[in-house]
Every structure is written in structure tokens, then in C-alpha cells.
Amino acid sequence: MTKLESKVPSGHISEKWTNHKFNMKLVNPSNKRKYTIIVVGTGLAGASAAASLGELGYNVLAFTFHDSARRAHSIAAQGGINASKNYQNDGDSTFRLFYDTVKGGDFRAREANVYRLAEVSGNIIDQCVAQGVPFAREYGGLLDNRSFGGAQVSRTFYARGQTGQQLLLGAVSALNRQIDKGTVKLFTRREMLDVVIVDSQAKGIIVRNLVTGEIEKYSAHAVVLATGGYSNVFFLSTNAMNCNATAIWRAHKKGAFFGNPCFTQIHPTCLPLHGESQSKLTLMSESLRNDGRVWVSKKKNDTRHPNDIPEDERDYYLERKYPSFGNLAPRDISSRAAKEVCDEGRGVNGGDAVYLDFSDAIKRLGKKVIEERYGNLFEIYETITGENPYEVPMKIYPAPHYTMGGLWVDYNLMSTVPGLFVIGEANFSDHGANRLGASALMQGLADGYFVIPYTMGDYLATYKPAAVKTDHPEFEKTAKEVKDLTNKLLSIKGKRTVDDLHKQLGRIMWNKVGMARSEQGLKEAIQEIRQLREEFWKNVNIPGSGEDVNQTLERAGRLADYFELGELMAIDALHRNESCGGHFRVEYQYEDGEAKRDDENFSYVAAWEFKDVGNWELHKEPLVFEYVKPSVRSYK
Amino acid sequence: MEAKKLNLKLKIWRQKNSNSVGSFVDYDVQVSPDASFLEMLDELNNRLEAKNEEPIVFESDCREGICGTCGLVINGHPHGPLPKIATCQLHMRNFRDGETIWVEPFRAKAFPVIKDLMVDRSGFDKILQAGGYISVNTGGAPDANSIPVPKDAASEAFDAAACIGCGACVAACKNASAMLFVSAKISHLGFLPQGQPERYIRVQRMIKVMDELGFGSCTNTYACEAECPKGISVTNIARMNRDYVRAKFTSKVIEV
């Protein structure tokens, strides 16, 4: 049985990473090219990892299901990236970023990992600037910063409202350089459908060529998964249409434990739903809360035009409830507060939306300044809704956005399967039960640029994994399993469409495993998910064949995994009898509605081992807080 | 409350694969004016799937106009009739009840159709892989504030770097020229001090690959700028040409 070993190095927290880097084994430069490393996913984590490993001299095979590395969903991140540079002289430090992140995560993250993240955050900014990322600057030519939720210092670096795009283009340019040099080979339009394990080590992957339908085999000495999160289990989320959990889920079924699956983030500032045909929810950057004020009417079912609701009849509920953080309260808290006022019937027209109002900021700073800061976001809003946010307050509502949970990894970012590393949003490691704004980009790049290049070398030098060819029986066997699954899906020929079933699953997840969870609701959800899963396997219909482009088949395979993952999320949420971060159990709250954490019983990472569909074994990694004392997380 | 639905006739390009001949197929749809264009296609596909017919293959991902995956020619315009948006940001309230809408893939020799509305734009990456970067290894960077960059330069670099690599410029051009795309990258890096050391070899290498891939020359009609969802300016092309000429006719000539 696999035991959970976090492998956190000893010593003072500020010296752990430095000491660990020195103690890790190295691979001689001339031996590096003898090692092949597979990197799946080309978002911030994957592209930066593949490029950095290529620079070191390893032979890297990078995979993406997109037509180009640049399409990965990191591209859509808007607001910014945190780093404790303290360029603003406002008291920031590695320790403060570490502290804010641990507290923001509601004391459910591993301290040593978070400290390392804060420690390398400054190097990320240096790296990106050197690559030509056009960050916002002051007139003197130095870098500008803005504030983000959950922090009282200005440490967020940004490139208008398109920071993710610029960082990803930077990482992809580093990747392109290695492709140019021949150290990285990029395989586009390939979807990973399984990991191959030989003698209990990860030795390769099976992918489907999305153009020809061919099932292809690739072998390597180690595999890195950088395949993002699983918010699309809700059907409607801010994730891109093709984001999915298949790579991590299939790895989970091959032995990688899944950490804290119920820790999902519902982002407070998204556009509300317009109707049944809606395909995704659009995020409006959290940076808008720097200058926008969130409010609803004090009256229920108020159908007046927002500009006709007088000042004294408005409830600026975030400023009222959390005076010291105000509109910049962390995401989980802001989302729940929005749900609360809407459940009271005080949302826009009594429905599910609240106002985000810029009129005060425009009066104070002028329209030009607001345009400079948020122009492109205002344009996006107007394109989608047909309303002008300079004149009418925006309408927003929370939506699934990010998953803090993911495959369990140790300090070296290796899963419970030796040789299988997991980086970026795909792992569970740094954000605990709630991620702070502008920290996802930081973590993706920290893992890819500054952690995996070291820990990979240590793995290769320590284990000296042997090369396996793709005609090895395990490769044949795994490829056959993948083919059988494809054929099984295609042969069902039932009556319901993939999207129809996915929307139904999404509704169960949103209503019962979403922002507010209860014991009864979760038990119902588990039953409903199981029933719907059965129906899926009996009654889904996938037209076309497997030997061609077949987007329905791609979506069906992903949905099949969501049915299993969705159940595990509900099981995890049901077992965690406390409220913390994005996980809110209605039974566990203080009288004023704030989350009631239970450190005595739940200060651990829940790492689930897959036994069979619908059957998991729970392992616990205790969380020890030596440097930040867990306290009631107050933003008042 | 959903607004009154629009009745539309769609004429959509269907093509089995790159070797077969395609044609337009008619579909009648009813759609909410609040839906996006791609949501309309989702609904249509869902209807086709329910009848066990093969859905229309089209690509999209972020649906926020930033990933550059989507790209349809709608009534003759790449990304549709409105300026400065990607296909995924086009909403049905911009169409009239009873209208006929023509939907085609991006068409260019260098962008072969894979199936229906899906095309192969991998040529763009091949151009970027020929020097569309600044050579810096991980860990080798100086402090981010050690080289001040004038705010205007950073801002102009950003304007060029905002390109989403969708290929609308190529689809809009009679010669299927990729010069707007290539020049945007040249300008982005050329505005920044970090981009200077490789400036002249970069422009030569990228243009060489662009030509080899079968993209045409600039027509000077500015159709690319007009259809660009991010409003990338044609002045970038002038800048690229200037760098190219300088590279060829000054002491900075580098053989590639």
C-alpha cells in the first residue's frame, strides 16, 4: 500500500528549499539528453516546464489537444500575477505572501510548498520581463502593481486585463525556442487518454490523434501532467470548452491519489446566466473590485432600474460586513455573500445577480483612468450583454472557476506513482481550500520554471529509471484498453446527447456540490450522479466513427470521467464535516453565517485512492502549521 | 425571461476531409437573441446528434475572444460582420429575424480544411518557432526593474502582443498574406529593449519561413486590419518591412 510521504525537507521554513536544492541529486549535463520526459499540457505550467527541461538538455516530448500550444486556457487569465517584490515599499515580503496565501487558503495547504511558492515569485517576474512580457509600467519605466483580493499590499503585476495571455505567450515563446533548437518535440491535437505504468513507475502515455483517430503510444523516463483543473464538471464554468479532467482522472485510476477533490472555487465576478443554451460563463476580472463597488437593493424583488435606486436604499454588503477588506474580500467569502443576498430575494430584479458599480470611481478618477485600467473588460461586458458599464452598473454572479483540489503530490510535485509528476492547477498543492486572486499564474509558472527542473533531475538521478519501448506488453495492454473504451462509447447508440447528460450532471453538481453543501444534499447528489452515470453508459448517443475528427466522442470520454470525479467530489465534501474556504457546509457555520472550520478533526489533506468505480479509500496527510497559527479567518 | 426567438436560415460549409469536395448545407434554426453565434451552433449540433446525424465540426475554446481557436467566415467576413471581436463574441442580437447566414471556414492555401469548418493553422507556429522569441534561459534573468522600459514603448509592445493568432488576417487577405500576424510579433519584441539583440536575425528568419509556407505577399488593402478581432494595426507591417530592409542593406546583414 502506498504511504503518503510529503517529503518536506527539514530545517527552518526559509531554508527548506535552498537546502533541498543543494541536497538533491544532479544529472550530468551529457547524460541529460539520454532521458526523455513527457509533458502533457502547454498552459503556463506545461509550457514553462517543457521549455525549462529542454533548456537543461533533456529530450522533451510535449503534448496538447489544441492545434497550438498558445491556446491553453491560461491564456484567458485576466487580472494578474502575484509576486513579493515589494516594489511599492508597502511592507510586502516572502513571508507576507506566504502568510496571506496560507490564510487565504483557510489553513488547508502545506506550509513548505506555499513558502517555496512565495520565495520564487520574484524570479517569475524577472523571467517574464526578460522574455518580453509587456507588463504595465509607470511613467518612469518601472513596473506597476495593483491590489487583489485577500491582500493589503499591492503585489499584483499585470498586463492590462490580459495578463494570462501575455505570460502564456512568453512561456510559449520559450517553448518555441526549444522546438527551434530541437530539444522539445511538440505534438498538437493529441489527447492523453491513459498513462502507462511499468514496474510501478510511469513510463509513458497513450494518446488519441484527434485528426486521424489513431491511438498512439509514447514512452519516456518520466511523465509530467500539466493539464489544468476540473471546473467543467459543473458544465457551466469560466473554463474553456475543452478543459477537462481526463488526463488526471485516468492517472488517478492508475494509482495517483486525488487530493481534496471538494475544494473548488466559485468566482464572485462572472456574468449571470442568460438562458438554457448558455455554453459557458464569462469571468469579469477580480481586479474590477479595486474600483467597483458591489451592492444590491435593501428591498426584496426590487425591479427598479439600478440608477433609480437612491443611495440610502442600497446595501453595499461587502463594505458593510467586511469593513477592512471591503470589496476586496477573498473570493469564497464574496461569492457566498452574493448568494446570501440573492437567496434573500435582494438580487437584481429578485434574481441571481448583484451590481458591480463604477459610478463612484468614475466621479473620483475620471472616465479616462477607468478606461485605461479596465477598458477591455468593459468592452467584453458590453459585447456580451449589450449594456454600457460606464453608464449602468454591471450585473455579476458567482460561477465555478478554479479547482484547488487535484492529484496529490509531495514536496517534489511527484504523485503517488513514481515518475508521474503533476504541476499547476492539476495538482492540489498550494492553495488549500481557497485560492487568492492572481496566485494561479504564480503557481503554474513557479512549478514549471523553478520547481520541476530541479526535482525532475533528483528523480532521474535517484531512481535511474530504465527506458521502455512502446512495444512493451504494458503499452500494448493500455492501448487496447483505450481502444476498447472508445469502441464501447461508440457502440452504445442510445437516445440522449452528450451535452444533455452533461448539463444534467452540472445541475446536480451546482445545486448540491456547489457554493453551499449539506449532508442531505450531498447524499442525494451521490445517488443521482450514480443513476445518471448508469444512464450515460446505457443511453448516450455518439454519431460518427473513431477513425476521424469526432468532437462528440472527445466530449463523451471527458463526461464519462466527470461522472466518476463528480461522485468523488460529493463523497469528499460529505466526509469533511467542517466549512473551510470554498467548501461550505451549511451545518458548520457561526451565527453570522461565517465558515466554521474544525482544525482538531480536519486539519489534513484528504487523499483518495481509487479502488473501483464508486469505491475509494481515504488516506490522510496531516497538516502541521509551525509558522502561521491557524486562526478564525477574519476579513472584518 | 428570454426574449423572442429569431428564425434563421443557415448555409453551412460541410466537408468530409481535406481531400474531399465540400458544399453548403441548409439548416433552419430558432435561436434566442441573447445566445452567442457558437451557442447557436451548439444547439444545432445537439439537434443533429439527437437524430444521430454527424454534427458540424467547428473549433472554439475560451469563448471570451482571447484563445484564438474559433474563426468562421460569416456572411463573407472572418469573425462576422462586427469589428474587433472574435467569432465567439458575436451575439445573435446582431441578426434580423428571417435572415440567411452563410458560414464558411477560413480559406487560404496555407490553412487547409481538416473537416467542415476546422482548418489547419499550424503554419503560424512554424513561423514563431523560427526566432519569434527572446533567447533567455530560465533563471538567467536580471531583476525585473533593472531595465526601465518607457511606458509608451511597453504600451505599444502590448498593442502588438495582443494578437491572438486566429488567422483572420490571412483569411481576409486576397493573397492570404500572413504579414499582419508576423509583423505583430516583430513589433512586440522590437519595441522592447530585451528584444534588440536578436532584432535583425529574427525578422529575416521569420519572413523566410513565412514565404516557404505559401503565405502570399501584402496587398496593401488593409483588409487584415479591418477584420482583426484585436485591431492590430498595419503600421506593424511597415515596421517589419523597415527592419527587413535594414537587416538586408546595413552592416547588420545576417545570412539565414
Image (tube, rainbow, N blue to C red):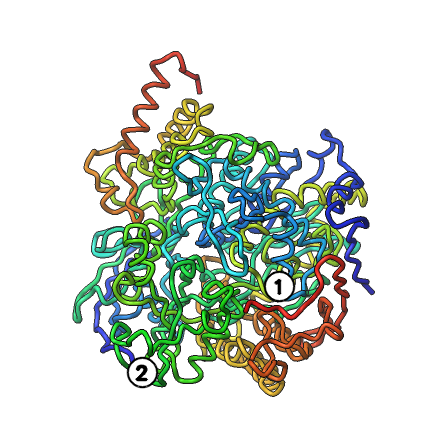
User: Where's residue A319, x and y in %?
Assistant: 45, 69
Kind of residue indicated by mark 1: Gly
Which one is in front, B154 or A416? B154
Q: Earlier in the sequence, mark 2 or mark 1?
A: 1
Determine which quarter of the picture holds residue A106: bottom right
Determine which quarter of the picture holds residue B22: bottom left
User: Where's residue A41, x and y in %?
Assistant: 56, 51
Which one is in front, A542 or A310? A310
Q: Give me the residue at 73% from left, 41% from top.
A: A457
Mark 2–mark 1 Cα distance, whole angstroms, equals: 35 Å
Determine which quarter of the picture holds residue B188: top left
Residue A127 seen anywhere in this rendered image of the structure: yes
Left or right, residue A467 beside residue A61 = right
Report crowding for label 2: few under 14, some 14 to 19, many 20 or more residues within 10 A (C-alpha).
some
Residue identified by numbered label 2: A302
Residue identified by numbered label 1: A105
Mark 2 and mark 1 residues within 8 Å of each other at the beta carbon: no
User: Where's residue B34, x and y in %?
Assistant: 28, 70
- Number of labels in the image equals 2
Kind of residue indicated by mark 2: Asp
Where's the C terminus of chain A, which quadrant?
Answer: bottom right
Left or right, residue B223 beside residue A451 = left
Q: Give me the residue at 29% from left, 36% from top.
A: B177
Residue A67 seen anywhere in this rendered image of the structure: no
Helix, strand, or loop for circle 1?
A: loop
